[in-house]
Amino acid sequence: MKKEIIIKHLGFIVLFNGAFLFLAWIISVFNHETSSIPLLFSALICLIFGLFPLIFVEPTENISFNEGLAIVVIGWLITCLIGMLPYIMWGGEFSIINAWFESVSGYTTTGSTILNNIETLPKGLLFWRSSTHWIGGIGIILFVLLILPQSKNSQLTIVNTEISQLAKMNFQYRSKKIVRVLAIVYISLTLLETILLTVFGMSLFDAVNHSFATIATGGFSTKNMSIAYFNSTSIEIIIIVFMLLSGMHFGLIYGTLARRKENIFRSPIVRSFIIVILIGIVLVAIKLYLSGYYSWWESVRNAAFQVVSLGSTTGFATKDTASWPYFTQMILIYFTIQCAMVGSTSGGLKFDRIYILLKSLWKQVKLVHHPRAVLSIRIGNVNINEQLERQTLLFIVVYIVTFFTTTLILTMMNVDSFTAFSASIATIGNVGPGFENVSSLGNFSSLPGAAKLVLTLNMLLGRLEIFNIIAFFILRKNN
């Protein structure tokens, strides 16, 4: 593994972060805020450390799979370290552990926070906080690939390590085209939502920040009460629509706009995903109404927002779901585990894997009756080979074992069982809020420092889909 290749690519990643830090610094200077110096220093650090390898390290034509994997994993870790710099320099509630938690939560688009009073942050720091969502949402590695002057083989290697095999099923393009498709959809959705939120009452600053968080399915808000602060049905509907879109495969969204055969209207997974979401909304709404919490319209409104918010792993809130009936909490926990589709900015287990699991179970039932039959799983017109089927089932098992192990570790730290369980699922799923002490309008500040560190590892495992991190450390050990 050639270290100079890895270092050069990491330089681009550091510079990309530095560009957003400069934007945050400009906002801070314009508003005469105390965060201007921390943001400027952080941006200069990125400039120095980002330019150094670009100047002194020779470019290369090819990158091996191991080098691509190292760039992805180390790139995410360095990015999270960069993200905590302005928090630590500014101070306030940001101890080193809290700054690391907030940074990892931002970049992995988890949206969990340690802040008790978000609105005390200067606008420059709020913009940087939301920017970590937007940078991490589509993957900083993929953004950087747009500007890397590398060969096609290098592009393909890094794309293969950043995008799972399952996610690439609906990308009928070469690696460079995949990156462009992702960027076009990502940027277009962000701009469109920003315009709509501004038209329907948000300030431009709030609209940009909430669009960054929505399209990245992150959930950081500029307000302590999240979306509940605005108390606007129009704003909630806009955000629901864009949370749903952001939870769908970006290749299918692009195909829909380009009038291609592969689009969201012809995808059986999209149809199934929408149906499951609607069932969840109906069940939660009925329970809220029958329990006397809200009128029927308010029950539907609140159920729709919370189900889509957790089902897309965004994590915005309009109500504190910790006070809702246990039945509705169980429904919401299911969506926290299931999450949205592969090929989106969503984290978590992914609905596609649940779909394949159910197909696989049905195949096994058929084999009981017809043991000599040769059966395969199909998604639309695509056959799922047995290797991908096994990988999917193994991933589900490892995913479940991981969040149960995390729950056990947190309870050892005297975190109550329901808080530990929901926090574990919410962080590995990159969802954000859980229940009890870490509910939708609460935060993670009361957890022990060691618990916060464990949960940040959960966030990274969820974002990198577990196997990439395991493979990276196995390769490091072998080398």
Image (cartoon, rainbow, N blue to C red):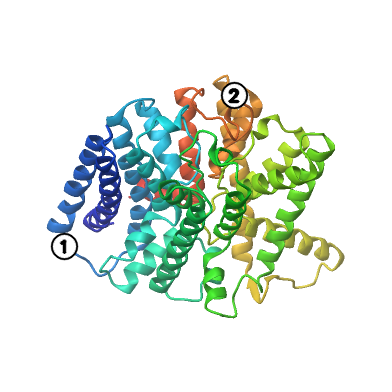
User: Residue 146: x percent and y percent?
Assistant: 33, 66
User: Residue 420: x percent and y percent?
Assistant: 60, 29
Could you tell me which secondary element the residue under label 1 belongs to? Answer: loop
Q: Which residue sits at x=70%, y=65%?
A: 271
Query: Which quadrant would the N terminus be assigned to in this image?
Result: bottom left
Q: Residues within 10 Å of mark 1 (few under 14, many from 20)?
A: few
Q: Which residue sits at x=72%, y=33%?
A: 324
Residue that sits furthest to the top in the current view: 414
Please tell me which residue lies in front, 344 or 288: 288
Could you tell me which secondary element the residue under label 2 belongs to? Answer: helix
Residue 365 left/right relative to 61: right
User: Residue 249: x percent and y percent?
Assistant: 56, 64
Please state which amino acid type lies under the numbered disc 1.
Answer: Glu
* Cα–Cα span, label 2 and label 1: 50 Å
Q: Which residue sits at x=70%, y=54%?
A: 277
Please state which amino acid type lies under the numbered disc 2.
Answer: Thr
Q: Is residue 264 above or below residue 220?
A: below
Q: Is residue 473 visible?
A: no
Residue 384 left/right relative to 156: right
Give the residue pinned by disc 1: 58
User: Residue 16: x percent and y percent?
Assistant: 29, 54
Quarter location, residue 156: bottom left
Q: Which residue sits at x=29%, y=72%?
A: 151
